[in-house]
Image: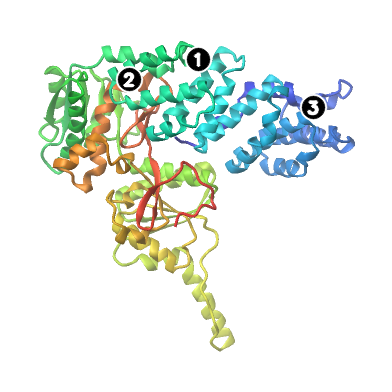
Amino acid sequence: MFNIPTRLCLSGLALCLLLSACSAPVKQSDPDIVEATAGSSQEAVQALLLEARQAKSPERERHIIAAAEQLIALGDNEWADNLLSAISRDQLQQQDLWHYTLVYSQLAIAQNNLFTAQQVLMNPGLDSQWELMPKATYVAIRQMRGELMSTLGETQLAIREYVALDHVSLSPVEATGNQVALWQTLMAQPLWELEQLAGNSQSREELGWYQLAILSKNNQNQLEAQLAGVEQWRAQWPDHPAAAHLPQDLQLLQQLIEEQPKQVALLLPVSGRLARAGKAIQDGFFAAYYQAVAAGHQHPAIRVYDSNTQDIAGLYQQAVDEGAELIIGPLDKDKVAELALLPALPVPTLALNRSEQNGSLPPPPQLVQFSLAAEDEARQAARRAWLEGHRLAMVIAPEASWADRAAVAFIAEWNQLGGTVVDYAKFTGKADYSKIISRALLIDQSKARAAQVRNILGRTMEYEPRRRQDVDMIFLTALPNQARQVKPTLKFHLASDIPVYATSHIYTGEPDPKLDSDMNGIRFSTLPWIFDTQRPEKLAIDAYSRDPAFNRLYAMGVDAFYLYPRLRQLREIDGTRVFGATGNLQLNTAGQIEREQMWASIRRGRAVPMPMVVSRQSDDS
């Protein structure tokens, strides 16, 4: 799902409502306090703390909570934490406890201590107090709980919060926002999880949402089947809130069907250095195409053009002149860059790579860029490691251009989040793993210190080298044969307890417990395609042409077929996602498809799916 969720911070509107509902009453005879609470400033904080010092409970605690809230707004989280930690929750009056819950949770989220926020917000004592809360407090707590549970992958708990908010008299904007949050949470989950959650529904309304999401996702690859399923659902659930106000992406289905292209052109390398990659993408694309044909669904005519034979502008125009109403390709990054420089394109175009264009002009609006960039995976690894509580990273990567790009992307994302990169170690793969890793972990310095002590004492002594202690996670970019050597080397150099996060490149996609046991404990993002062994397109490719080295490109071809009918939907409906073979796909404002892959870890030599976020105490070995 996810970037670090800025939406978890209360909106300005929610805060205003909250302050009116929860804040301590201010005496009109105290103009200094009135002025102080009107804005977030150090003077306001000092005034509140002075008032707290002179007051008795419960007024004292109310002023402390208000001061902490001001400090959070000022970005002084450490001071706010000290203030709130001095308060005993058990001694708070009911309304003060609600205010404390929101402020302390907001602080924990600001510090990315999401599991602490979870403990505070999900306090069972709140469940008996909902009817006693002012509306603004009720809405603020429910919203924050829903958003936090969604971020932590607690889908069922998140949905229950959003469903509860559906029964409150919200403004039209708030009601739409609540439905969008609910629907996005549902559509971010794989089909099997939705089916499992539906069986544990606690209300008919909740079950209705799950069933709508299941039929929508189950038919996501075919617009006509999805529309038919939605109409059938509405007939079965006429009183459900979604029956009157369908999610926006479902409202657009009929128009999408009517606007489908009659002819699609594939601009792929059939010859030249990228021919095998082009063939793999074609195999994935046509595996999906023939599934649609077999199911009797609407499908266009497909024409394939060799993008290696002429300049891309001429080939593109030829395809359009010969009737193409939509273009898929090219694959070559330089050719995508040429298209991105054009002021306009005549038909919708799904490029299969991403331009590195850094100019001031945006790419043409008809161009959507879909790639398997390692940089996206690196940024995702940074966000996950941060959410799981890590702050001090070491980067280990081979000397390769793709690995360099991934490492740079990770470092940039990590720094933006507020983390620290303590070292960046690069290896060549020529038996230098031990030397490079030992140096990065400062083992050499530890040995040198021991030698210095021996020389001073003039005698031998028992000694055990120590690694550096200022690392709490490692980001690894490597190919399988490299990762199988890096992890044991880390163990040899006393770093087996440091969590390792990696890109999908470490895993071949084929189970090999004997070799992969050397990677036990590594967490890595990966394509859903790897685990979806019964997917029809995958079975079709397995039957005649599969090469494990091209797993990622087969999946990309499959997704290209299912993405192109929904380009308008992705453009026009914020938050629309396609749960594809390469990940959870969403269009950003730059016209690029962003992929959120699933996570797995190596356990006993086998890749095993992981939950969305896990605590630092989790053992993946």
Q: CA distance from mark 3 to mark 2?
A: 51 Å
Q: Residues within 10 Å of mark 2 (few under 14, many from 20)?
A: many
Within-10-Å neighbours for mark 3: few <14, some 14–19, many 20+ = many
Comparing labels 3 and 1, the label whose residue is closer to the camera: 1
Q: CA distance from mark 2 to mark 1?
A: 19 Å
Q: Earlier in the sequence, mark 2 or mark 1?
A: 2
Q: Position of residue 449 (x, y in %)?
A: 54, 75
Label pair 3/2, CB-CB below 8 angstroms = no
Q: Are marks 2 and 1 in contact (CB under 8 Å)?
A: no
Q: Image quadrant for the N terminus?
A: top left
Say which of 340 and 431 sits in front.
431
Res. 451 in view: yes
The disc labelled 3 sits on which kind of residue? Ala
User: Tag 3's secondary structure?
Assistant: loop
- Up-down relation of residue 493 to residue 318 (above or below): below
Q: Would you place residue 542 above or below residue 314 in this image? A: below
Residue 15 coordinates in the image, percent (x, y): 66, 25
Q: Quadrant of the C terminus?
A: bottom left
Of marks 3 and 1, which one's residue comes earlier in the chain?
Answer: 3
On residue 226, which mark appears? 2
Q: Image height check: is 138 above or below 486?
A: above
Residue 165, position as x, y percentages in the image = 59, 21
Task: Say if residue 274 shows up in the picture.
Answer: no
| Up-down relation of residue 358 to residue 265 (above or below) | below
Question: Contact (CB < 8 A) between labels 3 and 1?
Answer: no
Q: Which mark is residue 241?
A: 1
Query: Could you tell whether 55 is left or right of 552 in the image?
Result: right
For label 3, the residue is 24
